[in-house]
Amino acid sequence: MNVQVVADPAGKLLWISPALPGRTHDLTAARAHRIIRICERQGVPVLADRAHIGAGSWVTTPIRRRPHQDLTATERTINRALSAARAPVERSVARLKPWRIFRRTRCSPNRMSVIAKAVLTLERHH
C-alpha cells in the first residue's frame, strides 16, 4: 500500500492519505491527493525526498548527481541541510513502521484508508 504522510517541521503527524495500491509511485500519489497543490495554495513549503523530483518549483528535493560527475561541495551541503530539515518528518514516518498493519497488509485500499485514519488518531494521542 502507498500511504502519503504530511507532518509539521517538528515531526508531528498532521495527515495520512487514503491508501493507494503499493505499485503507485510516491509522486503519482502526491499528485492524486493534491498534496503539493494544496500546500502551494496555503503557502506551506514542501520538503521531499528523491521520489518527488520533478514535482515542481514548490517542492524542494535533493540535488541529483549528474552522470559521471560528483556533486559539488555546495550541492552536498544543500543536500545535508535538506536531510537535516526532513529528519523529524522521517522519524514520524518511522513511528508508523512498527504498526504491523502497514507492513503486511492484505486488505483493500479502502479498508486500509480507514485503518490509516485510526492509526493517525492513536499516534496523535500517544
Image: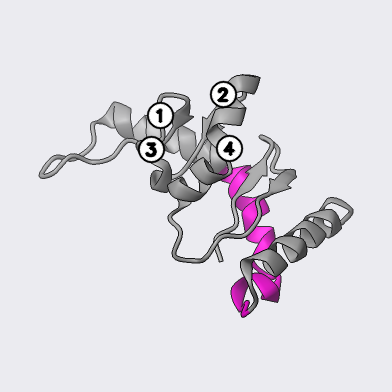
**Quick one: 107 or 82, which is closer to the camera?**
107
SS of the residue at dot 4? helix
From the image, tell me which residue sits under label 4. 35
Q: Earlier in the sequence, mark 2 or mark 4?
A: 4
Q: CA distance from mark 2 to mark 4?
A: 9 Å
Question: Of discs 3 and 1, which sits in the foreground?
Answer: 1
Amino acid type at circle 4 is Ile
SS of the residue at dot 1? loop
From the image, tell me which residue sits under label 3. 62
Q: Residues within 10 Å of mark 4 (few under 14, many from 20)?
A: some
Magenta stretch, overall SS: helix
Q: Position of residue 15 (x, y in %)?
A: 71, 45
Q: Position of residue 108 (x, y in %)?
A: 63, 72
Amino acid type at circle 1 is Gly
State if disc 4 and disc 2 touch (CB < 8 Å).
no
State if disc 1 and disc 3 touch (CB < 8 Å).
no
> In the rendered view, how is the structure colored?
one colour
Q: Earlier in the sequence, mark 3 or mark 4?
A: 4
Q: Residues within 10 Å of mark 1 (few under 14, many from 20)?
A: few
Q: Give the label on residue 10, or none.
A: none
Q: Which residues are magenta?
A: 87-106
Q: Is residue 108 magenta?
A: no
Tell me the quarter of the image containing the N terminus.
bottom right
Q: Position of residue 54 (x, y in %)?
A: 35, 36
SS of the residue at dot 2? helix
Q: Earlier in the sequence, mark 4 or mark 1?
A: 4
Q: Is residue 45 above or below residue 33?
A: above
From the image, tell me which residue sits under label 1. 56
Among the 4 quarters of the image, the one containing residue 98: bottom right
